[in-house]
Image: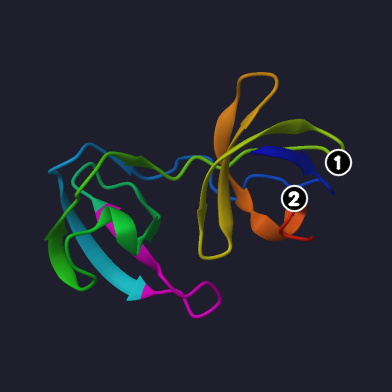
Amino acid sequence: MSIEVTKAYTSQYPDPICFDAGAAVQVERDGPEYPGWFWCRAQSGSEGWVHRSFLAACAGTTTSVRAYSARELTVAGGERGALIHLLDGWAYIRLDSGDEGWIPQTYLHLPNHGR
């Protein structure tokens, strides 16, 4: 699905959590602002928000069910690209420039989804 960025967004985490499928992940807390997202720590020590769909369980030490990167994009209004995933308020997109990462859904125009 094609998307357009409606306003600028700056990445909040310069060292995002990332892990491979099957990795041990420590779930620290949930995110009240974005239900379905959990603050986690990878074995590497990196921390960040992880959607529940990437985790075998949502408490304690668990295993990732698929590879994940919390890389956020810094974008300007008017940039275009494609929607890859839409998960509980966050969109994983690929910009026409080739960059991929997460931004809040509210910063996108999604045809047939409103703004």
Q: Badge 2: few (under 14), some or many (20 or more) residues near its Cα, within 10 Å?
A: many
Q: Amino acid at mark 2?
A: Leu
Q: Nearer the viewer, residue 114 or 24?
A: 114
Residue 22 location, quadrant: top left
Is residue 32 found inside the magenta-colored segment of the image?
A: yes
In the drawing, does residue 34 fall left or right of residue 23? right
Residue kind at label 1, given as amino acid type:
Gly
Q: Return the mark for residue 77.
A: 1
**Residue 13: horizontal and vertical position, in percent?**
54, 47
* Residue found farthest to the top: 97
Query: Residue drawn at (29%, 53%), measured in percent from left and top?
Result: 54
- Write down the region rendered in magenta: 30-41
In 3D space, how far apart are the residues under numbered discs 1 and 2 (Cα atoms)? Answer: 9 Å
Task: Please tell me whether mark 2 sits on a helix, a strand or a loop.
Answer: strand
Q: Identify the residue under disc 2.
A: 108
Q: Is residue 74 visible?
A: no
Residue 48 located left or right of residue 96: left
Residue 86, percent from left and from top: 53, 53
Q: Check disc 1: other Cα within 10 Å, few if <14, some if 14-19, many if 20+.
A: few
Q: Residue at x 41, y 55 (%)?
A: 48
Q: Position of residue 113 (x, y in %)?
A: 71, 59
Residue for point 20% across, 61% down = 26
How many tags in the picture?
Answer: 2
